[in-house]
Image (spheres, rainbow, N blue to C red):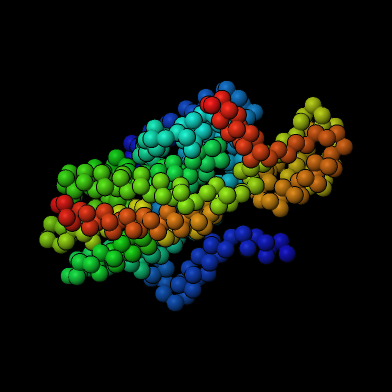
Amino acid sequence: MDIFTVLFWVIAIILTVISLVKDQKKTVEAMKKSKGMMGNMLGEIVAIIFIIGLVLTLIPPETIKQVLGSANTLTSTVISALVGSITLIPAFVAFPLVGSLVTVGASIVPAVAFLTTLTMVGMVTFPLEKKEFGMRFALTRNLMSFGFAIVIALTMGVIL
Amino acid sequence: MKTVEILKKNKLPLFVVLVYAALFVFSPDKAMKSVGNSVYYLLEMMQVLPVIFLLTVVIEALVPKEMIIRGFGKNSGIKGNLLALLLGSISAGPVYAAFPIGKSLLKKGASISNIVIILSAWAVIKVPMLANEAKFLGVNFMAVRWVLTVTAIFVMAYLVGRIVKKEDMPADASDLSVLQINEDYCIGCGLCAKRFPEYYEMTGNKAVVRKMPEDEEAVETLQASVKLCPAKAIILSLEDVDSEKARKELNVSNT
């Protein structure tokens, strides 16, 4: 557990204790409600995690590296953005991977597109987002994030 | 009948189980590898989900609705946007952990734009992640990408707020309604626990709520239980109604 997660735990526990002291009945009531909401999500979350595991097997980091480093910048940018949307790899894998490519001289545009969609667009978490916030919200947010990821990538190509 | 319903409600997990079953038959290597990959994320989930649970409880029980409306509501302006950005940035955990928090805030009157900011910032802006990026790609790279991303998030928040309305959000009954039993009125007849054992049970000689309604259908069923109670001790309140009222009251006090 990193320090931020620990801090997160500490804050949550302190707030819960305050809430319990202030109004025990209301807090217990809220716990029942949250239990219902989270219980409904739990199955989906576990399912999503296993989809992530599967996607990582089918699209391993080596394949991602090939896509990011391919010669044609425009097509590789779009494909990199797509790969970033589908996969969900941890930051401590993604940054070294992209870093090693950029050091050997690959274009940063596909790299940025990949890094940005990796976090902002969630194809795998889409079903959950749709369930919680509705189709219109999930679709609009993800499509826009995809578009902006490409814009950000192209802008960075110009600036840096 | 009951099994069909359970399966219908868990389409995604069912689908995943089938895919893995097929994979185990045709390519056990890949299946094992996928399970191995998933373990990392399962651990991550277990570290974060309990915190998320506690935070949704705190938002629900401790934070007054007016505070959320003032902080993150439609009229909270730039200050609300910055607050949302900060809240998303100081979070920990994967983006799906942000969904319950976002939902709790939305329910208490946060605007759609600010929900977009919280979700996006939660996914993108994290101090350990930024440090990692600076280490492998340089401080310049990290800083420029950060500025562009934050700009994009604000523009997106504005646009999504224009395109998506609150009516487009799913009306999740479990979030809108609260089931309560007034202890003072309950005569302990046990009628509710007998007819609706899923939702009520007897503790001593009083009835207590076991489970909150999870969808529209359950709310309808429970309305029958409200009528059934001879002491009229069951209260089923639709929170949506009073949040609407709270919003109006706040507008009145503002003008």
Q: What count of labels does the image hold?
A: 0
Asked whether residue A19 appears in the rendered view, the answer is: no
Q: Residue at x 39, y 37 (%)?
A: B81
- Place of residue A87 in the rendered image (x, y in percent of width and height, measured from the top left): 36, 61
A51 vs A73, left or right, is: right
Query: Does B77 sit above or below residue B146?
Result: above
Residue B102 in percent (x, y) is at: 48, 43
Horizontal side, residue B136 vs residue B252: left or right: left
Q: Residue B252, percent across and down?
A: 58, 28
- Would you say B10 lies left or right of A96 here? right
The reply to whether residue A145 is visible in this rendering is yes
Asked if residue A71 lies left or right of residue B120, the reply is left
> Between residues B149 and B222, which one lies in front from this camera angle?
B149
Coordinates of residue B101 in the picture (x, y in percent): 49, 41
Q: Tell which residue pokes out farthest to the bottom in this image.
A: B26
What residue is shown at x 77% (from left), y 45% (from top)? B223
Q: Residue at x 76, y 46 (%)?
A: B222
Furthest-top residue in this view: A22
* In the foreground, B212 or B76: B76
* Residue shown at the point (15%, 62%) measured from the top left: A106
**Residue most extreme to the front:** B255
Tell me which corner region of the image, top left, top right, bottom left or bottom right, holds residue B240.
Answer: top right
Q: Quadrant of the N terminus of chain A?
A: top left
Question: In front: B215, or B211?
Answer: B215
Residue A82 falls in image quadrant: bottom left
Judge whether A34 appears above or below A144 on screen: above
